[in-house]
Amino acid sequence: MGQPRKSRKKYNTPPHPWNAERIKNENKLMTKYGLKNKKEIWKADTLVRRYSREARYLLGFDMDQMQDEKLELLGHLARTGVLPEGAALEEVLNLTVEDILRRRLQTIVYKKGLARTPKEARMFVVHGHITLNGKKINSPSYVVLKGQEDEIGFYPSSPVAKQIEEYNKNKNEKATEE
């Protein structure tokens, strides 16, 4: 059954470690999303494969319980923002690793303009400068739900938040003077 204190790894490694094309694609994703290591890509890839496997399984049946499970899977993916509302089950098969990486807290902090680079966004999250619904989130891999995007901001007593407010205030004053 396994040791309860030691959790299993949540990713599968690539089947061939020295595939040049895969390594090049992973390096592009790492720079685009500011990832720390390739394990984060492999975790997202494992999620995509799990969703695809479940969708293929559900496409093979037409029972009532399978309909409930289809709605549950599609609802989960719609809540997380990976798929749009009302998407068909076949669209789950077209998911990519980037669809999962776009929903990470680190990426959304960067896209909202709270950080200048993805690496800086990661640093802000890890150092506790970012809140979600008023709670500090220290994990850059936290998957942000669709409805939570607007509630991301700086922690009120964060020195970074104060510096950015001062910078924006000075910037606005200079703009009004001219």
Image (cartoon, rainbow, N blue to C red):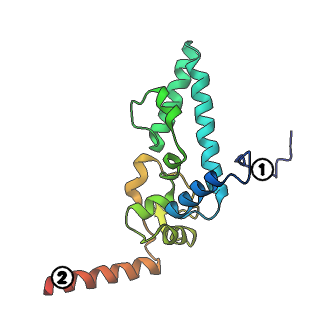
Number of numbered discs present? 2
Give the answer, above or below, for where 26 lies relative to 60: below
User: Within 10 angstroms of label 1, few (less than 14), some, or many (20 or more) residues?
Assistant: few
Q: Give the residue at x 52% y 52%.
A: 101
Residue 138: name its quadrant. bottom right
User: Within 10 angstroms of label 2, few (less than 14), some, or many (20 or more) residues?
Assistant: few
Give the answer, above or below, for where 7 lies relative to 133: above
Q: Amino acid at mark 1?
A: Ser
- Asked if labels 1 and 2 touch by Cβ distance under 8 angstroms, the answer is no
Query: Between residues 92 and 22, which one lies in front from this camera angle?
Result: 22
Q: Amino acid at mark 2?
A: Ala
In the structure shown, which secondary structural element does the residue marked by tag 1 occupy?
loop
Left or right of 1? Residue 174 is left
Task: List x then y, in percent, for residue 147.
Answer: 40, 47
Give the answer, above or below, for where 54 lies relative to 80: above
Q: Give the residue at x 65% y 54%.
A: 20
Disc 1: which residue: 7
Q: Which mark is residue 175?
A: 2
Q: Give the residue at x 62% y 30%.
A: 53
